[in-house]
Image (spheres, rainbow, N blue to C red):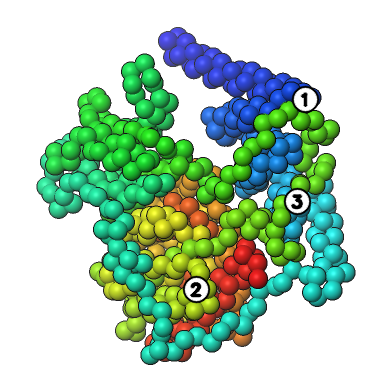
Amino acid sequence: MKKILILLLVLFSCFALFADDVDEYNSAKRDFDYIERSDKVTRRSYVIVADKFYKIYASAPKADLGDDSLHYAAQTYYRSYMRYANRDDLLKALRYWRILSSNYDTVLASKAFLQSAKIYEDQKDYPSAQFMLRKLIARFPRSEDAAEARSKLDGIDAQFASKTPTDRIQRPSLQPKPPIKAETVAYQPKEEDTADKAQSANRQTSFGDINSNVKATDGKAAVKRIRYFTTPDYTRVVMDLTGKVEFDKHWLKADPSIQKPPRLFIDLNNVVISPDIPQDIEIKDGLLRSLRWAYNRPGVARVVLDSDNVQDFTVFAMPDPDRLVIDVSNAVGSPKPPVHQADSRPSTPAKNEVASSSPVPAIKGTGSAATLASVFGLKIRSIVIDPGHGGKDPGASYYGVKEKDVVLDIGKELYAQLKEAYPNIDVYMTRNTDVFIPLEERTAFANRKKADLFVSIHINAAPNKSARGVETYVLNVTNDKRALAVAALENQTTQKSMSDLQGILKDLMMNSKLEESLQLASYVQKNLHANLYTESRYNLGVKQAPFYVLVGAMMPSILVEAGFVSNQDEADNLTKESYRKEIAKGVFQGITSYIKQFNGN
């Protein structure tokens, strides 16, 4: 009887929570209808209503109202943009519709592809519009929206066909300048431009000792060291552990009554924390005020991060060795473009609700080659090249060829080609020498440098010695066993532990740059294959898998597997300087295509 009562109480609580969400949703819908009819509201009213919808979605993304709430959050921001022409609103609408399209399999997800494509098309970013339309057709091939997408694709193609060559969007050239000779390389990375030479400049701070002997009994894990990497708008905190830990994370709003700032706290279950780590660590980097820890209850340590300006955060675990990573930033999902003063005057509401009812007001760009990113001032200005492995980690090694040496040479050549072609773009390398850089420090370095692209370079290996070809990866969950095997190899972990990362990624991918990463990957894959092979069977394609080195990247990021060192012929090729230059050239050409799409000619 007691169990039945408990079950009934749980069911009643769940129903009550759902009922609360329904009430909030209906209230937000009424507010939306009101501000659309009223000529006495300001942009602020739209922001408030959009935030109401987003909070309903964020509280339970998988609930029945998850996709509806996210759709209306996007729709509200879009309607605000149509009335007040504040480009922040358009970016928010686009971001929410893309989250919706990437994470749901519903009618609204299908329509979100159309809405995103329309925004891109209205801004004359035709490649991005085509990309979204093709994704819709692939995801929902039998839907009415797919038929509309096919029609729109035909229209875009016809529009290009009807124009003279000088009117068309300029396609990226696949013939860059010849690669620089190794003995006359004019561009060598400065020490401060590499993660292995710039620790002081990057303000890495640590407390505790990774080699300390912390007493942990009864199967508990120990926190041996806490370190953080910080800039004014991004901070990564890493806790080095002796084993896997379970944790719960919570965000608390400011409480003026007890003079408490907004704060993130993480409860670590069944752990001890090294006494060498201070219980109150002052950070004061513009984002975090401090880090505090204490034992909240027996067996549970609570770590508190007091916020000054945190707007977004992620928490995830990484194995081999075990550590817990906390990323905080002052931007939600993507860097903010320059903000123009919003028009707070009342205006006449638009007549229709749906985004497809009228075109997005055009923003001045650079002619027909303008993209949504370029008209919003989000051009490619910074690139980080990441040669994989290094130091004590040789990577895949066969026939006397070590992956770490090959990819470092390719990375240096790619750096030289980019610097020669784009002197106004900042280019950085995570390492410029044979040194070991932990995976979590590589993306942290890219985030601190505010990179617009992150390219990690690797060489593949397989038990089947006849395997050869190139493939390019982006970060995502997958059921592809071979993709998981490749990720496990690069992550230096087991496929079993990959399932934990897959679960984490389901949350992290909500703020990822998946669509942009796929575009970059497709350009690099196409050019890399064309440079190295004449047979299509060696084009292994663009794939998605959970790579630790890409986790937490705040920019479009890819991982390139430029051949198989386990194949005797390819291993021999990789020892040749000319072949390594061709690999760098293929990656360079792919990046060039992507840059031209965003920066124009």
Query: Which residue is tagged 2?
Result: 423
Along the line of sight, the residue nearer the viewer: 576 or 327: 327
User: Residue flagged by tag 3: what amino acid is it?
Assistant: Ala
Q: Residues within 10 Å of mark 2 (few under 14, many from 20)?
A: few
Q: Residues within 10 Å of mark 1 (few under 14, many from 20)?
A: some
User: Are the residues at dot 2 and dot 3 in contact (C-beta closer than 8 Å)?
Assistant: no
Q: Is residue 324 above or below residue 454?
A: above
Q: Position of residue 474 (x, y in %)?
A: 52, 60
Q: Give the residue at x 64% y 37%.
A: 342
User: Are the residues at dot 3 and dot 1 in contact (C-beta closer than 8 Å)?
Assistant: no
Task: Specify whether 401 is left or right of 422.
Answer: left
Query: Which residue is tagged 3?
Result: 362
User: Residue flagged by tag 1: what amino acid is it?
Assistant: Asp
Along the line of sight, the residue nearer the viewer: 461 or 210: 210
User: Residue flagged by tag 2: what amino acid is it?
Assistant: Pro
Q: CA distance from mark 2 to mark 1?
A: 50 Å
Q: Position of residue 329 (x, y in %)?
A: 43, 44
Tell me the element at label 2. loop
Q: Which mark is residue 114?
A: none
Q: Give the residue at x 28% y 66%.
A: 197
